[in-house]
Image: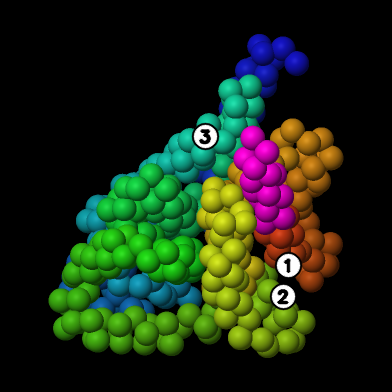
Amino acid sequence: MKESFKRNFCYGLVALNTLSLILFGILGIGRGNSKLNFDGDVLYAAGRTWLRGLNAYNYDFLVQSTAGIKDFDSLEGADFFYPPQSAALCMFVGLFEHSVAKFIWLGLNLLSIAAIIFMTVRTLNQHQNNSENHLGSWIMAAMIIGNPFTSHVVWMGQTSLMAFAATMAAWFFSQRQKFVWAGICLGIASFKPQLCLLLGIWFLLEGNWKILAVAFATVTITSAYPLVLYGGPVGMLAAWHQGIQDGYSSLYFNQPGSLDIVGMESIFAFFGLKIPAIKIMAIILAVLLWVFRKRINREDVLGVLMGISFTFLGYSHVYDYVGLLPILTSLWLYCSNNRNALLSSIALVFLLFFPRRIFIAAGLPFLIHWRTIVVLILVVGVVALSMKAKSRQEFQQEIA
């Protein structure tokens, strides 16, 4: 394959996926009557509520804070559940007029995409030779930009891209011995704890107290206003807990078994089985991964942890799958030079990205949860490939 063809193919691939993001994630083609940033509006309302010195976990106060705002959709069934450290982000956006704030939110999501691409390309460049990394970097960049989960998060104004970018940055900086930056990023990511919890446990197992201390300090700083407003940590956490009790679990799209919730618990719940203890499996598997960490390549750890989170930890929605990008990067690293493995990987990625609305239209709702099985296969596959590659490296070192 000529280099000029490869280069033009890469440019075209990224351009096509960028166009897809613009059409479906920003302009909202095929989105029906929904509006850009409709989920971000809830966080905007929370920020305005806190800025008025009121309790953001109280639905009536949320409604009052946005009363009279032009083009602001109803907040019916849209309570605020984020932990108090989200206050810094919410209040920042709440300082602006709504017409401006939604584009600030859009800008933050686009910056998160750029950061994820940068870290992914750096990872690929470190672990592939010059003849390989050019194509791989462009393919992964295109996938990051154009996958349906990214478009969905951008359109909704969700926080998954921001939280995952911060989680990925915590790992990225920790591998470069920049522990203060890693701690700051981990602290920022904690406003969506289901995405970064297992990484925090990994740092705990490693005894990396500097990262954890800086993360705790970051959480304290970003929670400073709620700490004062609710009269200290006890009152603050009580207000958050009450907010969750009052509404989170009562909403169908937050319940295991719904079409929006991913993971094994959700699959079992869909078929009428309740196994809440399955969440413990996520922590057990993270600990086991740490125990056998020397048997896998370190660059695969974040991807495997994210896969475990989505499969067993719970509390994750379909759009949170943007956090699977590291495991897809690992898959490319191992399969790009193996035709059969590459074809199998393409099939798995196709199934992961396949539109669920087709299954809904076909009257096959039980197939909605096929993505959890795909993610489980990805986790097992990458762990197996990583162990094989690690064993080969050690053997080559022994005979060298």
Q: Secondary structure at mark 2?
A: helix
Residue placed at 46% from the left, 40% from the top? 119
Instruction: Return the x and y of residue 242 as percentages of the image width and height.
Output: 36, 87
Mark 1 or mark 3: name the one nearer the start of the chain.
3
Residue placed at 59% from the left, 63% from the top? 292
Is 384 covered by the magenta stretch? yes
Where is mark 3, residue-wise?
Answer: 126
Q: Which mark is residue 267?
A: 2
The amino acid sitting under disc 3 is Gln
Is 255 covered by the magenta stretch? no
Query: Whole-Å distance between the Cαs marked 1 and 3?
Result: 35 Å
Q: Secondary structure at mark 3?
A: helix
Most foreground residue, 251 or 133: 133
Instruction: Return the x and y of residue 66 as percentages of the image width and height.
Output: 31, 66
Say if residue 142 shows up in the picture.
Answer: no
Most foreground residue, 22 or 112: 112
- Which corner quadrant holds the C terminus? top right
Residues in magenta, as a range? 382-400
Mark 3 or mark 2: name the one nearer the start of the chain.
3
The amino acid sitting under disc 1 is His
Instruction: Return the x and y of residue 358 as percentages of the image width and height.
Output: 78, 56
